Image: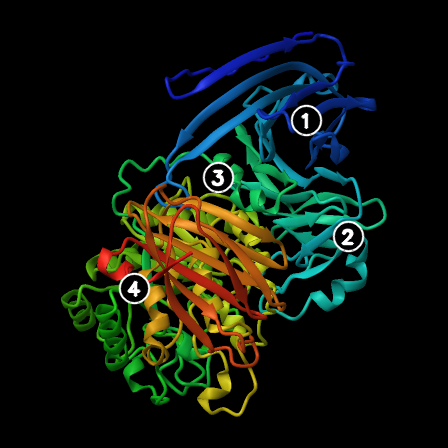
Amino acid sequence: MNFKPKNPLIQFSLARKLVWFTFVCATPYLVQAQTITSPNKNLSLQFELKDNGIPSYQLSYKGKSVIKPSTLGIEVKDLPSFMDGFSIANTTQASVDDSWSPVMGEEKTIRNNYNELVVTLAQAKNNNRYIRIRFRLFNDGLGFRYEFPKQTDLNYFVIKEEHTEFQLAGDHKIFWIPGDYDTNEYAYTTSKISEIPGQIKKATVYMNAQSPIKDLAVQTPSMMKTSDGLYINIHEAALINYPAMSLTVDPTTLKMSSHLTPDAVGNKGYMQTDTQSPWRTIVISDKATEILASKMILNLNEPTKYKDVSWIKPMKFIGVWWEYFVAGKSTWAYGKENNVKLGQDFSKLTPNGKHGATNERVKEYIDFASKNNIDAVLVEGWNVGWEDWIGNWKEEVFDFVTSYPDFDVKALREYAASKGVQIIMHHETSGSATNYERRLDRAFQFMNDNGYNAVKTGYVGQIIPRGEHHDGQWMVNHYIHVAERAANYKIMIDSHEAVRPTGLNRTYPNWIAQESARGTEFEAMGGLTPEHTTILPFTRLMGGPMDFTPGIFQTDLSYYGTGGKQRVNTTLVKQLAYYVTMYSPLQMAADIPDNYNRFPDAFQFIKDVAVDWDNSYILEAEPGDYITIARKAKGKKEWFVGGITDENSRTATISFDYLPKGTQYIATIYADAKDANWNEKPQSYSITKVIVTSKSLLKQYLAPGGGLAISIKEGKASEMKKLKKI
């Protein structure tokens, strides 16, 4: 056999414990299976070649089958595929145990501990062309990917489809949204896997720029629970230069298979060696809390190459935003016209009288932010082009540097600076990525020139280049290009309508948040079910922080006098809890300032709550039902607790054993009142203060669709004398 694979380059450091073992076989097929276990021995992975040299793996947890024997492979165009005819030419094993610190995050330090198996597979029928499959088995799950080393007989290839299988061991409960190439803003459906065919039509409601997958498919992250209490989450990590993966579903055999997003001509990916696929991830535990605590997806991403990250900072903001969604209070557009072009004199448009991004209105938001120690103000609708921005598949919609006549960039910049407040830029692309890329440097330079250090990007609409999809390889590369280019200008990115995240906030830490799911804006467009946010941390947030835009205090939207019955399906206190349960280093107080002025005692929690953390403690959780999380503020002796429930009331059990022993703290408890309900008296709440220690235990009532929020701080002895201890 002529194939002689090179051993991997091994680097040792004091921080890393690394051990390699190498096995070489020159026989056509390796009869015995290759097996590794997780560091804690709970997980076991087995790899082998089936008949005809087909790669296969299986996974078990504490002796229970999680993934039954499942095949692996990639089908390519105009070349022999990476599907069969393999022999095992080489295997290596490694053990790694180190740690790292994210720029921002839920934990100050993250442990990276796994056992690795790398299998080199050669195809004798194709002149010993070879690939590698790399498996990493952590205590909380498995990550694996395909690697295509540079070699004589493999330079360029086009992916027709990836055939990674996940043969499930039962008809699990699954929390899912329909497979779609362009949107992940669907509401979640909970069902058995076998029940998906009967519910897929109802679940695939109309969405803007919608492209449902024709095959029966669901999106990742896909969260499941087995009948015997095992939690399984399937997703991907480090999505770079590759299309996003959905999962086709066979409801009879209970097999899921990878389905990649195609491009405009139907191809899935254009590859040049040396290259690799994203990691396919399976997070597993018999405790739901450990699913939420998992950092495996982050660990599978590469460290950042940015030399200076001092300019990347978490922030809290308000914005000219929610008022566009409720009661027609104001609009993004300045003029009444519905046919405008870049370059025309926008001062000659007929004002519609409802433009929101005016000098006067923005100053009101700046004043509110300054008064309440809020870092920044987002302003949407400041720039020309909003009159006909959506639905026309128009390429040159915005130029990102020209403001409407009633928005004075220089004057507002100076006013905000005098108040110690930043303004967050808004770049809606209308899906025209080509236009945005052409104008990107000018737009970022404009931001630098005018003191903007963060931008919210948007991709509402069908993508241009026409025929491409939000989740395809072209757009995946576009989002990363925007993040990298922004870093050159020291600008942070908050992307909306982008591909769902896969932990890339580690590699590109200025890509600080994404929407990429059904967020608060849908509360004004049909509403979110009370269970929605008890599912999102198990699905969408597995890949990274979400700009969910919480903090809506006026939950009955008929308050604005439109006569409609639309409402936000939470209590006011549940909105407070989101600042803890829905992690993001970029948190918006999304309501109109007038509503915060009506409830100043409740707004105090939003003013106080941190957005960056030293430690997080998942106290209790069940997908679709409830979540309770405590977190320690970064660099402070302050802790915050958030708890949420679905449409059912419940009593949460709050432990404080993470507090330093022997010290008393003041806990301010924001709670639903006994008569509160998400649809009746949602603004009924109480605020109490008590003394807590590491030995305290609190039983707290949550109303239907409700929540709880607690801030824990050091207090003066004189204040503590007046308080009850629990």
Q: Is residue 154 above or below residue 277?
A: above
Earlier-in-chain disc, 1 versus 2? 1
First in sequence: mark 1 vs mark 4: 1
- According to the image, label 1 marks what residue? 44
Q: Secondary structure at mark 4?
A: loop
In the picture, the quarter occupied by the C terminus is bottom left
The reply to whether residue 668 is in sight is yes
Q: Do the residues under discs 4 and 3 have CB atoms within 8 angstroms? A: no
Q: Real-space Cα distance between discs 2 and 3?
A: 28 Å
Q: Which mark is residue 262?
A: none
Q: Which residue is mark 2?
A: 193
Which of labels 1 and 2 is toward the front?
1
Q: Earlier in the sequence, mark 4 or mark 2?
A: 2
> Along the polypeptide, which appears first: circle 1 or circle 3?
1
Q: Secondary structure at mark 1?
A: strand
Left or right: residue 634 versus residue 293 is left
For the point 52% across and 81% down, which residue is it?
A: 681
Tag 3 residue: 298
- Tag shown at residue 722: 4
Distance from Cα at disc 1 to Cα at disc 3: 21 Å
